[in-house]
Image: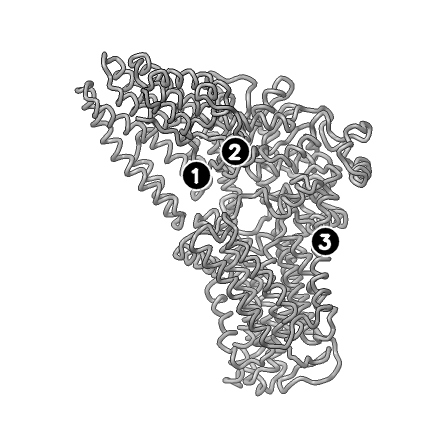
Amino acid sequence: MSDSPEPAGITESAHGISRETVPFFSVGDKAAFAVASIVAFAGYWYTLAPSVTLEDSGGFLTAAHNLGVPHPPGYPVWTILAWIWQWIIPFGSIAWRVNLMSAFFGALSVGLTALLISKSGRVMASRCGFLQAIANEAAMHRMVLASSVSASLILAFSPVLWSQSVITEVYALNAFFLMVTLTVLYRWSFETERRGRLYLAAFVWGVSLTNHQTLVLLTVAFPTFVWLTDRKLGRDLLAPILWVIVLGVFKMVVTPGSLFHQGSFSAVWILAHGVGAGVWLYLLWKESSGLLMLWRQVLATYAAVILGLALYGYLPLSSATNPPMNWGYTRSVTGFLNHFTRGQLEKVHTERTGLQFWGQVNMFFDDLKTQFNIVYALIALAALFFYRDLAREDQRWLVFLLIAFLFLALDYIFFSNPSFERQKQFTDRVFFLPCHCLYALWIGYGLILGAGYLFSEKPQLQGAAVPLAALVLALPIASVAMNWADNEQRGHDFGYQFGYRMFKPGGGYPEMEKGAILFGGTDAGRFVPTYMIYVESQVAPRAKTQLAKYPESGMFDRRDVYILTQNALAERTYLHSLRDHYDAGRPDPKKPETLQDRSGWQGALFDFAWRGLGRGAAYPQEAIWVPGENEFQVALQQYLNELYTRPRLPGEDVRIEGGRVSLQGLTSIMAVNGYVIREIFDHNKDQHAFYIEESYAVPWLYPYLEPYGIILKINREPLSQIAPAMVARDRAYWDALVESLHNDPRFNRDDVAEKTFSKLRSAIGGLYAFRHMAAEAEYAYKQAIALCPDGPDGNFHLAQLYVESGRYDDSVAVLEEYQRRDRYNLRIPEMIRVIRVLKRQMSEERELEQQFAAQPGDLPLALLLIDSYAQHRRTDAIDEVVTTLLARPVLPVETFLQIAQRYLALGRVDRAIELLTVMTQRYSQSQAAWYNLGVVECARKNCDAAVAALARAVALDDGDHHVLNSIRRDPRLDNCRQYPRFLQMIGQQSNQPPPSVTLPGGITITH
């Protein structure tokens, strides 16, 4: 790797580099690749999951089998490869075949790691000063081979790569693309005048971005390596990228609401990138007389990246065929852009304190230590120890790897802003797999350089190269032993069991009715049944999952069920997809009017897919009612009307700009989902049974729900109670299931399965809690905790149940035990603190109740008691105190207004209006009574009542027209300001633009 590159086919020796023409990769390099790949693949094959697994697996499998579009950003290259792979492998279930694809690419990434370590390690050894004195070349070659294989297998059996190589996921392929990119780049660095290899590396990197977008963080590292290797080309390749970074940072600085303006930490981090890019750009400009002298080669490199990215063109093509997995409705321009940019996911929040960031970085390195154990992690540092002894070209290679590592780690931490909860750490660690691959290279170099140093200092050890190499080769055994229990998936049928039990629960429950509508909530709850309906139910028997414990698995067929995602119903693109699947107006070649919204090429593709891809037979034949745009607007308006009656809850972020409603907060989105579910339920309940696997609670549904195995059934009408027979059947079912799961040692070491089944039991506990069946709720929550002791759902819900029952010490005890299992979860100590404060407040509240009972005429004491109740949102208790106060013959005006303000703060607009109405009856000459009644009615957009009340206030106005002038200026009255009777009252014409809608949550009483 130099400005004057060596020719292809160099041969390294301890004394230098010969000019003999031989293949670039030696026999030893290829042997390292073969051994590492075969061993890794054998390990993955043996520990492969037998069928669909939990989390995202079902969605990916459905997309792969049907050439569909998975969740954002679409993963087109993975989907295409998986679709091809399932036809290449002619045996096993579809899920098992695609699981095997993960094993294949995981093993290839391991082999490429060994190949790269072997080649670059031998080059380092041949050019390292203290290693050139080693006379026994064979000894060094053995150590290079052993170190390459060992380091790569340590990676192979590290927790993340192993776990992702035995299930259906995209991360093994992500590691493969990274290692291909690095290998091709390294090969190019020896013959930089052969640009083809550089363009190939750029193309592969572009393709990798269509698999997983985390590798976009190589945007600076990739051209940096080119610059370190070929100054002129690298300078011209870097300059445009640095310009884009500078301009991007500038745009953030001048754009309100951008990441830069989220807070001081975000601003400093982004500004550091902008300043750094600017300084680097200036240094590049000073380095040479001109930039972009090699613009043709730069354009060719960028074009190669764009050519790889062109695979995203698959998304609109697939979406046009109406596949079962059609996330984002990418056949439309809006849907495609939203999907590609991950717009459907929660917005990025990068602000934190410097101390929090330091904790996140420590958490990353703590996980890195977990991936490789502390000994192997320290071996990698040996490469830095010998850095000064390496040739300049090898130093540049290590610098590039370090830069890539830091960008992939630190910038991802910045943008993802990971929390400290154990469950979140577990799910987020897969995003750092590229860092693990880079670190494995360093481990290999540390082993090679360390062994070489040992041989140079102790020449007598060169004769013991074989046993030393064997010892190095044995290092991965420790990784296998330490990580086996948590990552092997052999015989783990919990994903299939989850899906099977949704339709055929057993345990005294009947099979799900034909033509049922199923709302899936969690990732597993929507993706696994989707796979069961669109893959398991529709493939030939030889491609189905066949498990002995489920005798009917080989004949499973529930294509009659309609699967809907609970959490996506507020997303217009998802509703488009649902209408195309199930609505009476869904596309059908036999009904040309249903294809009018499709362009010519989209219609042709759909016509082909109808026959060639089986779209015509994929969906239930009977249509169901699915809300259109107008019905969605009704649901949205219902939610907005609800907002007018109460203050906003945490996580509710609704913006109305230019007449368009934008839902930003998760709580708002879930609330609208609930209204859409209501519309679907009301229109279809007479023809179809309904079920739900709950993710977020839908309050209006609770009266309709009853336990149904692992999920919940939605009855057509509200139930007066959960009958004792239902409770007994539910308890017997879960007692048997919990015992069965705990008797399976595989379940007890499967974190994902534990979390999933715990969540299911916790959801049923939530139903009991709603029904005030405390004993049954407690029993269910305790089972949820038994299934997953470190799961948040069971622990937090049980703690909440104890708080509502006044068992504060029991609540704290639950959380303290939870904290011992999840010590970095910051929510736990905060909740413990709140409960202890609540316990003290409730003690004080009881004292106030006793005092008020003894002195019911003490108004200040009554207000203190109302404040205490309000703090705990005990509106029923407030009503009792108010009833007592209203029984008094005289209640001061100020007291009326103070109580009304407290009702408004609680969102009880109805009670505030009732109280103000009583006030107007008792104090009919009070301007404040009539005026405030008008204000509150206006907040509810009840303009007739508002104008009537305000007119009474105006009638009581003085000669200076203080009330009338106040009405003209008061922004709290904007909801009715353009109402004709309002304008008539204040003597103005409607010549103003319509005001923006005022949402409630900040209504105040005028005293």
| Residue 802 point in image, percent of width and height | 34, 32
Label 1 environment density (alpha carbons within 10 Å; few <14, some 14–19, many ≥20): some
- Left or right: 991 in relation to 902: right
Task: Give the labeled residue for mark 3.
Answer: 310
Kindly indicate the quadrant of the structure image that contains residue 798. top left
Residue 912 in view (yes/no): no
**Image: 489 above or below 229:** above
Kindly indicate the quadrant of the structure image that contains residue 129. bottom right
Residue 922 in view (yes/no): yes
- Left or right: 778 in relation to 991: left
| Residue 716 point in image, percent of width and height | 56, 18
Picture disc at residue 786: 1
Secondary element at image label 1: helix
Q: Looking at the image, which residue is at 69% across and 27% down?
A: 583
- Left or right: 699 in relation to 553: left
Kindly indicate the quadrant of the structure image that contains residue 900. top left
Q: Nearer the viewer, residue 374 or 390?
A: 390
Q: Which of 398 and 998 is in front in this view?
A: 998
Report how far apart the C-alphas of labels 2 and 1 lie in the structure.
Answer: 29 Å
